[in-house]
């Protein structure tokens, strides 16, 4: 593995000069805006470096530093690289999809209503809602997409009993987006951005 393109990119806008170590989790959250493929490649690069560290192959790590011009970044020496790997990998794994967490209908939607959506009948900034959802990680994203798919289906089928149950669930949380003219737009934008 000779190309550390994703690592170098992360060290630029996400974890560059002026961004302290205490903000590494925020940097990972910001980095999650990239495609799944780019994030996967980034993790592969980190795991490769971790393997070199575990094998005490410090000469190869120094070559990575030299070859990729990391001297002027936060990862200018082996100790800093060790710290980086130790801190960032658990954070990345925290936000990854976990198959062992079962889907519970409406659990994600309830959580979304409790923590993210501002109770209002007016147009919301759906982009900010998507950013907040992405901060919850891939498992939450997977579950909220299932919930939103169900909501969309219920309203398309005009199933009044199920619609009333959904509206009651939302209105109990003082969230009125499902009962507004923006419902379909909300579902479409959130689903498109998260897919």
Image: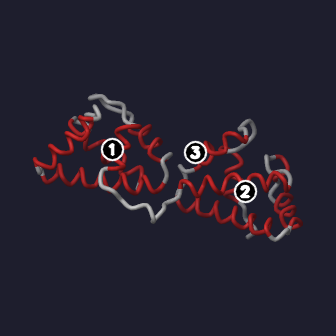
* Quadrant in the picture for residue 113: top left
**Structural distance between the alpha carbons of marks 3 and 1:** 24 Å
Q: Which mark is residue 30?
A: 3
Structural crowding at the residue carrying mark 3, measured as other residues with C-alpha within 10 Å and reported as few (<14), some (14–19) or many (≥20): some
**Quarter placement of the N terminus:** bottom right
How far, Cα to Cα, is label 2 from label 1?
A: 35 Å
Quadrant (top left, top right, bottom left, bottom right) of the C terminus:
bottom left
Describe the element under mark 3 as helix, strand or loop.
Answer: helix
Toward the viewer: 130 or 24? 24
Q: Which mark is residue 85?
A: 2
Q: What residue would you read off at disc 1?
A: 110
Label 1: few (<14), some (14–19) or many (≥20) C-alpha neighbours in 10 Å: some
Give coordinates of residue 105: x percent, y percent: 30, 55
Lower sequence index among marks 3 and 1: 3
**Viewer-side label of 3, 1:** 1
Q: Residue at x 53, y 58 (%)?
A: 96
Who comes first in sequence, dot 3 or dot 2? Answer: 3
């Amino acid at each position: 593995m000779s190309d550390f393109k994703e690592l170098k990119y992360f060290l630029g806008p996400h974890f560059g000069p002026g961004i302290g170590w205490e903000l590494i989790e925020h940097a990972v959250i910001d980095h999650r805006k990239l495609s799944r493929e780019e994030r996967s490649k980034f993790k592969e690069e980190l795991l490769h470096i971790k393997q070199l560290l575990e094998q005490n192959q410090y000469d190869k790590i120094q070559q990575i530093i030299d070859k990729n011009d990391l001297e002027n970044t936060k990862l200018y020496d082996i100790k800093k690289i060790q710290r980086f790997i130790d801190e960032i990998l658990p954070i990345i794994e925290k936000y990854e999809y976990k198959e062992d967490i079962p889907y519970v209908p409406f659990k994600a939607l309830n959580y979304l209503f409790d923590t993210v959506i501002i109770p209002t009948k007016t147009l919301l900034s759906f982009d900010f809602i998507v950013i907040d959802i992405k901060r919850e990680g891939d498992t939450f994203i997977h579950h909220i997409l299932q919930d939103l798919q169900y909501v969309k289906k219920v309203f398309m089928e005009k199933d009044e009993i199920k619609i009333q149950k959904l509206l009651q669930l939302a209105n109990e949380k003082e969230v009125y987006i499902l009962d507004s003219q923006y419902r379909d737009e909300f579902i479409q934008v959130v689903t498109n951005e998260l897919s």
